[in-house]
Image (cartoon, helix red, strand yellow):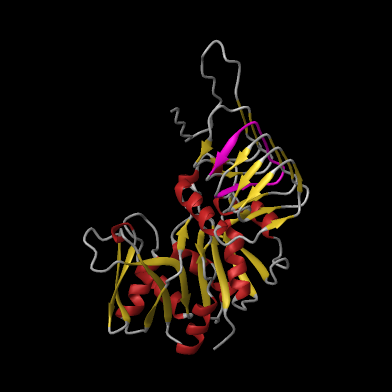
Amino acid sequence: MAELKGLILSGGKGTRLRPLTHTSAKQLVPVANRPVLFYGIQAMADAGIEEVGIIVAPETGDEIRAAAGDGSAFGVSITYIEQASPDGLAHAVLTAEPFLGESPFVMYLGDNLLRDGITELARTFATERPDALILLTPVPDPEHYGVAELTDGRVSRLVEKPPEPETDLALVGVYMFTPAIFEAARAIEPSPRGELEITDAIQWLVDGGLRVDPHVVHGWWKDTGQVHDMLEANRLILDDIAERHDGELVDSRVEGRVCIEAGARLERATVRGPAIIGAGATVRDAYIGPYTAIAEGVTIESAEIEHSIVLAGSTIRDLDSRVEASLIGRDVTIGRGPAMPRAYRFVVGDSSEISIL
């Protein structure tokens, strides 16, 4: 078998994460202070994959190139492939065909996170040598996913969001293919939503008698497409964080596993882990609760926050109530205004959601 290549899809518009994604690619929104995209690249590097292609959209391609670079920071070589319009996952595969050539490859959706990576999957694919290998995981609500039906340990049918699912095995956003998938992608017709669906291409392989094997994931998997998913992924990754105190602590208390990056300064603060405080952050007269990621250059002063993600350069100060379950973008300022008169004043971007409790 030729050497395995990697393909990461990073071209989606991220409409469910607006307003953050009006100004940034959704794959670059950080989880535990690291862009989601980087976890996928690292998973490929850990599996021994050396050549990685990243599908990008015209609107966000430059930003993703600037963030991930040539791949040398991860130990891989990255090639960027522009997909002019988001016409489906199977269309993305065809767009990447010149890069992939005759190589088998792993396709990884750039906003997905797999706790245990893809090393075992790559080993299984190389040993068993099926025509395709798909990742599945049991979910409580399979009607919201593509669902696989198995016969004698092989995939026999794929159904997209079935109203009455036959199984609870949902497709995870990671697939392994041989070049047979190119013929399949060319043979199918666009779905009712106008896209070339990867589920239809895989079904074409099955119907043609090709071997599609399942690989059931037992560690956690997250699709970080929505805010509550981002916060849950942040929680899951922080659960495994290593304790490290490289910053400066002045009259402060740290409880549990907390990572404090170099240049961070805590004054009269309490941080209860698991949590991460980024480089150059300032936490003063404040409380940082569990499952919180404070990015670089953030200031938290006279405020309390937990189970939240605060992106770089933001400031939260002088709040009477605790901030919780929040995703706060870059260079945001949140503070208490004058107490009287009691009125709200907002400058709010498109598709924002504001809850006043």
- Residue shown at 56%/11% (left/top)? 340
Q: Residue 8: horizontal and vertical position, in percent?
A: 55, 65
Would you say residue 266 is visible in this rendering? Answer: yes
- Tally of marks: 0
Quadrant location of the C terminus in the rendered image? top left
Q: Image check: 100 left or right of 214?
A: right
In the displayed structure, would residue 292 be above or below residue 107?
above
Q: Nearer the viewer, residue 74 or 129?
A: 74
Which quadrant holds residue 280? top right
Q: Residue 65: horizontal and vertical position, in percent?
A: 67, 57
Q: Nearer the viewer, residue 104 or 247?
A: 247
Q: Image check: 328 left or right of 66?
A: left
Would you say residue 188 is visible in this rendering? Answer: no
Q: Inspect the magenta stretch and tell me whether residue 305 lies in it.
A: yes
Q: Residue 21: horizontal and vertical position, in percent?
A: 55, 44
Q: Which residues are magenta?
A: 291-306
In the displayed structure, would residue 150 be above or below residue 171?
below
Q: Inspect the magenta stretch and tell me whether residue 344 lies in it.
A: no
Residue at the limit of the structure toward the top, as seen here:
341
